[in-house]
Amino acid sequence: MTATLDVPPAAARGRVAEAVLQAVPGSMWKARVEQVSLLSVVLGPLAAVAAAVPLAWGHFVHWRDLVIAVVLYAVTGHGITVGFHRYFTHGSFKARQWVRVTLAVLGSMAIEGPVKRWVADHRRHHAFSDGAGDPHSPHRYGAGFWPMTKGLFHAHVGWLFDAEQTNQKRFIPDLLEDKAIRVVDRLFAPLAAVSLGLPALLGYVFSGFTLAGTLQAFFWGGLVRVFLLHHVTWSVNSICHVFGSAPFRTRDRARNVWPLAVISMGESWHNLHHSDPTSARHGVLRGQLDTSARLIRWMEQLRLVHDVRWPSPQRIAARLVSAAPA
Ligand SMILES: [Zn+2]
Ligand SMILES: [Zn+2]
């Protein structure tokens, strides 16, 4: 990991610098195919959840399904938060090669897009946060009820359908040079299939090889789990840039949203994150739960990762609004 994004260049903020977007996809036809497949990835799990309530009422759930769903949520979710976000995007720590590849694989299994694209979009988000050029700012349509409602929808899920994509040469030169990561990136579709197939397989085995057990585990551990993880990740882009508290100084509207702390695995301490993007810990204040930071700490103790950027008490204190000069 060589390139990290700490402080966005001041000159680049507030305007769309040249070459933020790249001329990919090569044709509108390809863009439309991507949009349709994306729509199925977004709507499939949504339909599953809409069906979940009546199905659960009809006892279409077994404790086994919930265990599979929670475990896969935690494993693939931390693949995003620890892997795609804190490691690949921000370089909060260094990792052994096999750990690096494992993080890329587990993050891909969250089905939020291939690693290169995810990281490029997120680095661009930090470079232009809440300004022109930010791929998903809820403030893009201005203040007021309807502009904000539209903005929240755009920041949550609408932006995914933008045909233009982030210029990877500009934002992820480090990943483009990495052969192993390029391979994992190309394997996104098979990894997504594994992510959905694994719960079905586990359900099949642990239900004593029954079709009902297979379908149930696929439903809860596959579709419902992916749905929840998607919307929690997207809530960090939408809700955490509008609602919540801002104890730390930032140049954007990032907020800390405590009700999402557990389910977002520490990512909803988003105000601190934008104040100090390379910090391995986002929940830095007393009582702020951050399971992603806990996991990084365990990996550090097991010597799987090193050079972790833990924030010192002085660094945290200096970023508090109350510490800012009047
Ligand atoms: Zn943000
Ligand atoms: Zn970030």
Image (cartoon, grey):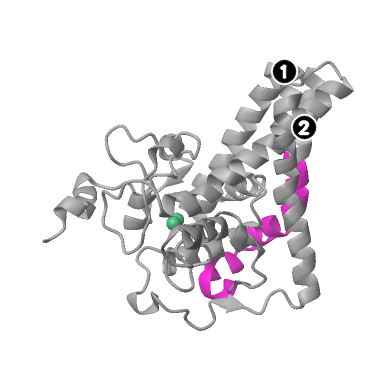
State the residue position of label 2.
218
Residue nearer the viewer, 83 or 288: 288
The residue carrying pointer 1 sits among few (fewer than 14), some (14 to 19) or many (20 or more) residues within 10 Å by Cα, namely: some
Task: Tell me the amino acid under the disc marked 2.
Answer: Phe
Which x, y percent locates residue 17? Answer: 47, 81
205 with respect to 288 (left or right): right
- Residue 144 tag number: none
Task: Tell me the amino acid under the disc marked 1.
Answer: His
Mark-to-mark CA distance, 1 and 2: 12 Å
Which x, y percent locates residue 243? Answer: 39, 48
169 with respect to 139 (left or right): right
Which x, y percent locates residue 276? Answer: 33, 55
- Is 219 colored magenta in this rendering? no
Q: Which residues are magenta?
A: 167-195
* Residue 57 to residue 114: above or below: above
State the residue position of label 1.
62
Magenta segment main secondary structure: helix
The residue carrying pointer 2 sits among few (fewer than 14), some (14 to 19) or many (20 or more) residues within 10 Å by Cα, namely: many
* Residue 110 to residue 241: above or below: above
Which x, y percent locates residue 136? Answer: 52, 62
Which residue is most to the left? 326
2 with respect to 26 (left or right): left
